[in-house]
Image (cartoon, rainbow, N blue to C red):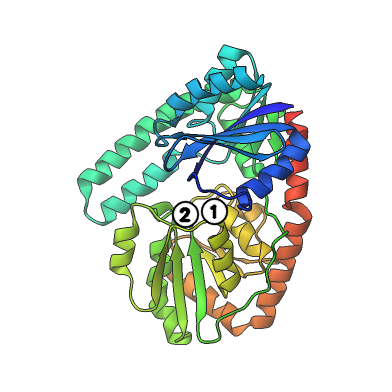
Amino acid sequence: MRVLMLGLDEFSSNLKKSSPFFIHHKKFTDYVGEIHNLCISKDKNFEFNYYKDSKIHTIKTSKILFPIKSFFVGLKLIKKYDLQVIHTQDPILTGLPGFLLSLFTKKSLIVSFYGFIPDDKWINSKWYFKRNKFIKSFLESLKAISLSFLSYTLVRIILSKAEKVRVLNKVLGDYAIKLGCNPKKIFIIPMRVSLENLQEKKLNKDKFIILNIGQLIPRKGIDYLIKAMPLILREIPNAWLYIGGYGFEEEYLKKISGKNIKFLGSLTSEQVLQEMVNANIFVLPTLSEGMGQVLLESLSVKTPIITTNVGGISTFINKDNGILIKPYSVKEIADSIVFIKKNSEKAKQLTERGYELVKRKYNLERVAKLVGELVK
């Protein structure tokens, strides 16, 4: 099978074949066939042959313009390589060009559904309102309303025209059905992690490292984690909070940060895994989430996790492999971190069970095989 995969991954021209993206897609190639990934470039347009006949093709553009540019580039790729299937990463920014390409070329369309965009805008609106930025709050509300209408309309059309729809878990499957998707089209295929490069944890004896990695946006709830630090430091004086990633909330988060908080900036996939290996605990206090790839990655390197019981997180995180807390709760964040620190044996049990879950259900081999069956 020859497949065009449309994704919003961003790459620079100096990327290496050893990156996790290529490790994963090499495995997909083994099960799917020839894959042509069409993604975003940070510096210039380029092509990269990463395994057998599979290639990555990039467009130097923004995510907003990607739907337009990817349609025209996609047409050329379909014709040049005689591609048979179009697979999109989401139902809108890649789903729209994928839908149009399918319409023009009569190729099969598979759409991945990982969540719903307007949710971010509603959370952004509340975030601005709480900080007395009423005009920005109003504008975010308008965006949420317009995006809700536009997204619901587009998603309904695209999901109805797709031959198959991939969701990460039952929660997102039910969400897709509410949006009008035929249940018979839905296939549950989770996120995946590679266990090939599992490193032995080497913890810093002088620091208790609390790690958070992701977009620095209101939906991720990082401000609640920062506000929990004074409570944590009372019980764990050598605690340090490391925050990785970037986003428009960064300036505000730095402004409210106190002692023992370090911002790591943008990280490569390799750096993310290294930070997870070095961390004593990973905390994701998110307010809305489809699944949470970073949680799987943390489990894969046996780092204890604390996260909120929202979205599809509870479909794989429970009392046996992590700690689930309520969203918006500074006290629960602090109490849970202190609990992990003071109960090392319990923490070890959680990580061992979490690792076994990843090994059994979310390993790269199993998920690549499921994707191969989906495409064929």
Q: Give the answer, above or below, for where 78 lies relative to 364.
A: above
Residue for point 49% across, 30% down: 92
Residue for point 76% across, 58% down: 359
Q: Is residue 190 visible?
A: no
Front position in the image: 62 or 360: 62
Kind of residue sitting beneath label 2 = Leu
Residue denoted by label 2: 287
Identify the element where label 2 is drawn: loop
Kind of residue sitting beneath label 1 = Val
Q: How many marks?
A: 2
Residue for point 62% across, 49% down: 17
Identify the element where label 1 is drawn: loop
Image position of 145 (left or right of 9):
left
N-terminal of the pair, mark 1 or mark 2, is: 2
Question: Which numbered marker is on residue 184?
Answer: none
Q: Give the answer, above or below, for where 336 lies relative to 318.
A: below
**How packed is label 2: few (under 14 Cα within 10 Å), some, or many (20 or more)?**
many
Which image quarter holds the N terminus?
top right
Image position of 308 (left or right of 298):
left
Residue denoted by label 1: 310
* Spot occupied by residue 27 in the image (x, y as percentages of width and height): 73, 44
Q: CA distance from mark 1 to mark 2?
A: 7 Å
Front position in the image: 70 or 333: 70
Residue 76 location, quadrant:
top right
Residue for point 73% across, 70% down: 352
Assess whether mark 2 and mark 1 are in contact (beta carbons under 8 angstroms): yes
Image position of 225 (left or right of 183):
left
* Spot occupied by residue 168 in the image (x, y as percentages of width and height): 64, 43
Which image quarter holds the C terminus?
top right
**How packed is label 1: few (under 14 Cα within 10 Å), some, or many (20 or more)?**
some
